[in-house]
Image (tube, rainbow, N blue to C red):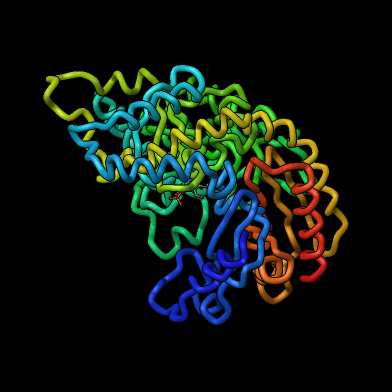
Amino acid sequence: LAHDQLAAHKGAAPNDLEAFWLPFTANRAFKKNPRMITGAKDMHYIAADGRKVMDGAAGLWCCNAGHNRDPIVAAIRAQAGELDYAPAFQFGHPKAFALAARIAALAPGDLDHVFFANSGSEAVDTALKIALAYWNIQGKGSRTRLIGRERGYHGVGFGGISVGGIVNNRKFFGSLLAGADHLPHTYSREQQAFSRGEPEWGAHLADDLERIVALHDASTIAAVIVEPMAGSTGVLAPPKGYLRRLREICDKHGILLVFDEVITGFGRLGFAFAAERYGVVPDMITFAKGVNSGTVPMGGVVVRKGIYEAFMKGPEHVIELFHGYTYSAHPLACAAGLAALDVYRDEGLFERARQLEGAWADAIHSLKGLPNVLDIRTIGIVGAVDLAPKPDAVGKRAYEAMDVAFREHDLMIRITGDTIALSPPLILREDDIGEIADKLAKVIKAVA
Ligand code: PLP
């Protein structure tokens, strides 16, 4: 960046930090010593002091095409000048239909209808509500139970936290959805430590769904929701054969299967959706983040033909699904989505992720043996390093790693507990991979 641009960025840092209550953040520590970001381009953020910081996390797993990409920026600018907003209730604008068709074409099987929301949390609540309504309209209103998984993250709506498996997300709010139950998570350090890609051990854990069905009876279960790869609780790749087994058991008992692909969608695992990587077609896919490379809030659900068609009955002037958001299919989000999908296609970014997976895994696994490293996992362009917690303070070592990475090693990482998670933009090159691994090695040593 030119010097005057950097100076402009510098000036953008406010000096009163009190009013903003930061989400999922240690607010007091942040406000004492902020990590302020004022610009971005491609693989980098620009910090308020002008430093270029390598983005090892694609923001929050979302900027898959890299930052401030010209075609996406141009599309958002043009859209703002042409049509700022249009309601999606009883009206429509062309780009909403175009984007839905593009997303449906990327999804496998007969997943060919798209409902738009504005975030991953809303996408999850939408999918859960569609599942409940689907059974209701078929006269099977007893199917109300929703099954998630331990260590699952499905956003922060009341539906998402109920099926989610993160204790802290429920502990303070209760679990408002009656009857949610959870599959066991699929991680075992003993069996899987230092796995590259899908672990060999663990497919049998899907069979626990049979136990849950036996306990509650299939006639009470509406849907099972899982992330193909659990991202937010530490990058847990599915064991080989696990998702296929889950699909088989759901089919046997007539239970809907939802893949939450908010992280895994749009190239993160080398395919448009993880469903394609695993050759398993769920009944619904939730997406967000990468759909427009994180540029404008957007999420949604891709739904199988049979589910959509089940709703398309009765008098034609009547609303079929009582659900939607003021900003569903917002014109700016749709324009950004179409432009991002063009970038993914034109630059072959999903294939690129697939091609780089081996080099990525080699680089991240080379950190084995550094102080406090208990496990390393990689899959697609995602990686995780588990650090040993400090004896007196769980989460502190990784917190310090995140802080020192940003301040002293010009690297942005994401942390969860004492796990470091990596998911850089998919435009990365081999030398970026080396740089991320080198920087991370220094960070891990710094917090030893
Ligand atoms: N579902 C999954 C799998 C996620 O990883 C996330 C966010 O990380 C969400 C849902 C929630 O998305 P949002 O923060 O956009 O509401």
Q: Nearer the viewer, residue 353 or 149?
A: 353
**Residue placed furthest toward the right:** 369
Q: Is residue 312 visible?
A: yes
Q: Nearer the viewer, residue 215 or 369?
A: 369
Residue at the (30%, 28%) spot, across then down: 94
Q: Nearer the viewer, residue 246 or 121?
A: 121
Residue 179 image position (x, y, % from top left): 38, 45
Q: Nearer the viewer, residue 23 or 244?
A: 23
Side of 134 where 389 appears, left or right? right
Side of 303 where 322 appears, left or right? left
> In the figure, 274 relative to 308: above or below?
below
Q: Is residue 191 visible?
A: no
Side of 208 where 95 appears, left or right? left
Residue at the (68%, 71%) spot, across then down: 407
Residue at the (65%, 32%) spot, across then down: 270
Query: Considering the image in quadrants, where does the C terminus appear?
Result: bottom right
Residue 162 image position (x, y, % from top left): 41, 50
Residue at the (60%, 22%) spot, across then down: 279
> Disc count in the image?
0
Using the rendered view, name the quadrant where residue 85 is placed.
top left
Query: Considering the image in quadrants, where does the N terminus appear?
Result: bottom right
Residue 354 image position (x, y, % from top left): 70, 31
Residue 159 image position (x, y, % from top left): 37, 47
> In the figure, 185 relative to 404: above or below?
above
